[in-house]
Amino acid sequence: MNRTIKLALIFSFGLFLSANPSAQELSENDDPEFQRVAPFQVFDNLYYVGAKWVAAWVLETDQGLILFDTLYGDLTDIVIDGIRELGMDPNDIRYVVVTHAHYDHIGGARRIQEEFGAVVLMTEEDWQMVDEDPIYREYPKPMRHLLVTDNGTVNLGRTGLRFVKTPGHTPGVASTRFTVYDNGFPFQAFMFGGVGLNFEGVERTETYISSVKRLQSMGDIEVNIPNHAASGDVFERYEMLKDRKEGEPHPFVDPESYTAWLDQLLVMAEAKLVEEKAAAGQ
Ligand SMILES: [Zn+2]
């Protein structure tokens, strides 16, 4: 693995997992001008339309678009503008997969439903969160559409998604596997839908650990598509992709760093479990 990427991978953990962002980070996070990233193509059928700190992705199929996550507030403009800038039409969004019901992923779902008639998919556990008091911030509540179930599939044209429920970060995190193509060559991609350890409790931490172990046992994932850019070095890899010479490997095809990342997550979660147990007097 490229050394720069490895360093960035380790460095980005600290940033991404900081549970209490400073006031400056908060306002930078919410500022659409600060957050705006020109949208870009990563694979034949996959595009980045997210912001700096939180991701959104479009998977293009022969029967329309699948959007992963929606950002929130004014940041949702970045998603919609990005789809148009890439030459696609947001009216073609058929499905929105919401990885989990925290405002930064679900916040624009209601708008995408209303403006473009897209169908929103989420797990039962996270649909229930929509009816409860929000954990971090309010957002317009999406209408309840379809359920993501463990091992469930959704097909759109010739494209298939397979879901893996990976609870922990929220009670019903939706992770997805799908195929991406690089000049026609297929690769197995995976989006781990909720990574951060900003939750509490022994039981929830044990649940998170089981989810990570389950992902480790899958073993055939070649491409990590993260829902926060920093946790998969999206921008660094895109710089490498732009400079790629003919015949060189695609910088997002990196099973080794995906595996190393899961290993790191497990180490951190096991350390958290020790702390949670101590706090609970266990
Ligand atoms: Zn979250």
Image (cartoon, helix red, strand yellow):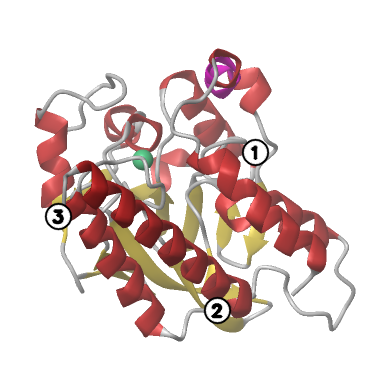
User: Is residue 271 shown above or below 246?
Assistant: above
Determine whether the residue tagged by mark 3 lies in a helix, strand or loop.
strand
Image spot of residue 168 (x, y percent): 26, 53
* Contact? badges 1 and 3 (CB < 8 Å): no
Which of discs 2 and 3 lies nearer the camera? The answer is 2
Instruction: Please name the amino acid that badge 2 sits on.
Output: Glu
Q: Which residue is mark 1?
A: 85
User: Is residue 18 shown above or below 175?
Assistant: above
Q: Residues within 10 Å of mark 3 (few under 14, many from 20)?
A: some
Given residues 116 and 276, the one toward you in this image is 276
Q: Residue at x 38, y 47 (%)?
A: 197
Which of discs 1 and 3 lies nearer the camera? The answer is 3
Q: Start and end of the magenta stretch? A: 26-31
The secondary structure making up most of the magenta span is helix
Gap in Å between the C-alphas at discs 1 and 3? 30 Å
Determine whether the residue tagged by mark 2 lies in a helix, strand or loop.
loop
Q: Which residue is mark 3?
A: 147
Image spot of residue 264 (x, y percent): 51, 64
> Quarter holding the N terminus?
bottom right
Instruction: Please name the amino acid that badge 1 sits on.
Output: Glu
Please check the rendered image and state whether residue 27 is part of the magenta-colored stretch, yes or no.
Answer: yes
Q: Residues within 10 Å of mark 2 (few under 14, many from 20)?
A: many
Given residues 11 and 201, the one toward you in this image is 201
Image spot of residue 129 (x, y percent): 15, 36
Task: Tell me, yes or no, if residue 49 can be seen here.
Answer: no
Is 104 on the left-hand or right-hand side of 183? left
Gap in Å between the C-alphas at discs 1 and 2? 28 Å
N-terminal label among 1 and 3: 1
| Quarter location, residue 271 | bottom left
Q: Residue at x 52, y 46 (%)?
A: 228
Q: Which residue is mark 2?
A: 222
Image spot of residue 180 (x, y percent): 53, 72
